[in-house]
């Protein structure tokens, strides 16, 4: 597992955000941030789990996301919000954690 970013929900869209239609969320490019921060603005009808919308999360890259979520408390199941990116959210020790598989 490799650290990728910290995701922080915000209450207003920020300049430079892109829309992820399937999740109804606006996000910035965490890779462009020197601190690896991903700001998230959720549309009112976003289907994402409440904990993901309300709480800060940390994200890690994993090699096999299906294996990585096995036996975990899953907040959001494995999905592919954009080509080449699979994500899932788990709950670990009271905190949402995003798992990401690239490619």
Image (cartoon, rainbow, N blue to C red):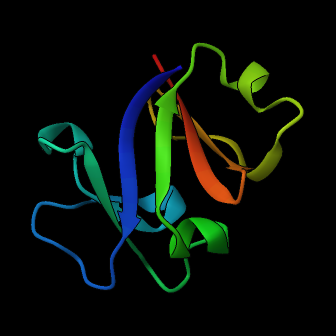
Q: Residue at x 58, y 13 (%)?
A: 63
> Relative to 28, does residue 30 appear above or below in the rendering?
above
Tell me the quarter of the image containing the C terminus: top left
- Residue 75 is left or right of residue 89, and the answer is right
Q: Position of residue 9 (x, y in %)?
A: 39, 71
Q: Position of residue 77 (x, y in %)?
A: 74, 46
Q: Residue at x 79, y 49 (%)?
A: 74
> Relative to 73, does residue 39 appear above or below in the rendering?
below
Q: Position of residue 46 (x, y in %)?
A: 55, 74
> Relative to 93, does residue 42 appear above or below in the rendering?
below
Residue found at the far front of this picture: 93
Residue found at the far right of this picture: 71
- Residue 97 is left or right of residue 81, and the answer is right
Tell me the quarter of the image containing the N terminus: top right
Q: Position of residue 58 (x, y in %)?
A: 47, 47
| Count of marks overlaid on the render | 0
- Residue 57 is left or right of residue 39, and the answer is right
- Residue 14 is left or right of residue 80, and the answer is left
Q: Of residues 15 and 4, which is closer to you in this image?
A: 4
Q: Quadrant of residue 52?
A: bottom right
Q: Residue at x 42, y 29 (%)?
A: 3
Q: Residue at x 56, y 20 (%)?
A: 62
Q: Quadrant of residue 75?
A: bottom right
């Amino acid at each position: 597992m490799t650290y990728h970013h910290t995701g922080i929900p915000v209450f207003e869209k920020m300049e430079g955000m892109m829309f992820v239609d399937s999740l109804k969320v606006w996000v910035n490019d965490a890779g462009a941030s020197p601190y690896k921060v991903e700001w998230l603005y959720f549309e009112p009808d976003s289907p994402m789990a409440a904990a993901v919308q309300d709480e800060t999360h940390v994200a890690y890259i994993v090699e096999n996301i299906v294996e990585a979520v096995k036996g975990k408390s899953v907040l959001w199941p494995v999905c592919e919000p954009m080509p080449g990116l699979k994500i899932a959210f788990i709950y670990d020790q009271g905190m949402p954690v995003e798992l990401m598989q690239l490619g």
